[in-house]
Every structure is written in C-alpha cells, then in structure tokens.
Image (spheres, rainbow, N blue to C red):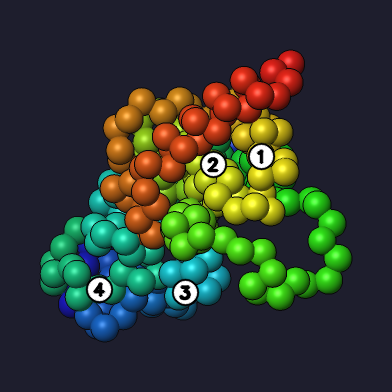
Amino acid sequence: MDLSLFVWRQQAPDVQGEMVAYSAKGISEDMSFLEMLDVVNEGLISNGEVPIAFDHDCREGICGTCSQVINGVPHGPMERTTVCQLHMRNFKDGDTIFIEPLRAKAFPILKDLIVDRGALDRIIQEGGYISVHTGGVPDANSVLISRKDAETAMDASECIGCGACVAACPNGSAMLFTASKVSHLAALPQGKIEADQRVRSMTNAMKKEQFGNCSNHYECNAVCPKGVKISFIAKLNREFIKSMISGDSSD
C-alpha cells in the first residue's frame, strides 16, 4: 500500500517544529507501524536526509517507549495496543496519517517524536517502591495474600508508564499513572508500611512536575494500552485522604 504521512519534525527542544509531508510506498499490511517508519527512514537515509527520530525498545508492547500520537490518538486507533503492536493492516491504501509526539507540558520534546518522560520516573523515585529490609527472598507462600488483593495488585501493576494517559488528558494529568503505582503497593502487605508517606510524596511529586488535575474525562482509560482501570484513581484519592487523617499532614 502507499500512504501519505505528515510527521512532526523538530531538531532540538529550543527549535520550532513543524509537520512535514512524506510518502510511504510499497508498505506491506503485515508490517508493524514502527517497521513502516523504518522503511521511511531507510529511504530518507539513502537520499542523504535526516531520518525521523522516534523511541522504541522491546517492540513487544512491554516497555511503552514507542508512544506516539497517531491521527490525534496516543498509540493510534486500536484499543489496548501500543504503537509497536499496531499493524498496517488497520490502515487502507491511500490513507493520510498524522504522526506527532506526546503533547503535554510535563513532556518536553527532545527531537521529532521523542519526548522527555523523566517526570514519570521522578514520581516513582518519590515512593513507587518498598524500602523495608526483608533479608533473603521469602518463599512464595510465607506471606499470605487474598486472591482479591493479589488480583488488584496485578491489575494495577500492568501500567507500563508510557505516558499515553497524560497526553490524552485535557489537563495533562498523571493521575492514572500515579494511581496504578500507589494502588499496586497499597494492596500488598509489603507496601502498607510506607503507604501513608508514599501517597503523599508521589502526589506532591505530581504537583511539582506540573501535571494537571484529574477532572474525570476518562480519556486516560480510553487510550491506555493495558486497560488500567479508572477505579484506581478513586483508590489513590482514598489512600491520600486516609494518610492525611492517620499520619502527619505537614508535608
């Protein structure tokens, strides 16, 4: 198939970017979206032009680094699908495709389709872990966890931190991302020791990184490639209120 592409090109963070038109010819419907971009880049390189810069790593829908906005939707038109899992069979010959980086105040553009998502890492650094010393690795059955709690923790841990939720939110909120990390640990006994401090620290980190507030648009859930549940945001709010009641609210 032959496609018309409009791709955001920006050579550096302090340089004005623009949409540039490209042609993608002879594209197989069995290619992934990233493989299609590889073909386009091969053509640009052979013509002595600068290839399109975009993030990728596992290409298996695990790492989340391939985040792009395709025709206005983070990760493209398919539900619960990352860009690397999106195949060209979902497009038609002659289609026009617009490809942009994630758009959010907290994600400054580095080059072309690559943004700095370090703000999400800094939220994790503020509390998305447990620091209690447990010695050697315990046996699987030494700490009993109910099936309900185990399934809740597993569902929350599916978040891959791609940032699609932030880009889709009209407010640029990171609530779904932060809620998934808080809910994951709050459901497990190992995470309860630092639960109060964790939720306050990670919430404060969101504010510091200039993410917006959640106003229940649900766009975050709609574009999440792993289908992380919106109910985890309610869990985050409950954990935050509980921490302010039971703990020191000075921070």
Q: Secondary structure at mark 4?
A: helix
| Image marks 3 and 4: residues in contact by CB distance under 8 Å | no
Sequence-first disc among 2 and 1: 2
Residue situated in front as seen by the camera: 19 or 73? 73
Front: mark 2 or 3: 2
Sequence-first disc among 3 and 4: 3
Q: Amino acid at mark 2?
A: Thr
Front: mark 4 or 1: 1
Q: Amino acid at mark 3?
A: Arg
Q: Secondary structure at mark 2?
A: helix
Q: Which residue is mark 1?
A: 195
Q: Residue at x 66, y 45 (%)?
A: 192
Q: Which residue is mark 4?
A: 88
Can you give x and y, in whole percent of width and height, for residue 156 in the image?
A: 48, 54
Q: Residue at x 38, y 64 (%)?
A: 82
Can you give x and y, in whole percent of width and height, for residue 32 in the image?
A: 34, 76
Check residue 59 in the rendering and tell me which mark sits there, or answer none.
3
Q: Which residue is mark 2?
A: 178
Can you give x and y, in whole percent of width and height, for residue 138 in the image?
A: 75, 71
Sequence-first disc among 4 and 2: 4
Give the Cα separation between the discs numbered 3 and 4. Answer: 15 Å
Q: Secondary structure at mark 1?
A: helix
Q: Amino acid at mark 4?
A: Met
Give the Cα separation between the discs numbered 4 and 1. Answer: 44 Å
User: Dividing the image into 4 quarters, which one contains the N terminus?
Assistant: bottom left
Give the Cα separation between the discs numbered 4 and 2. Answer: 32 Å
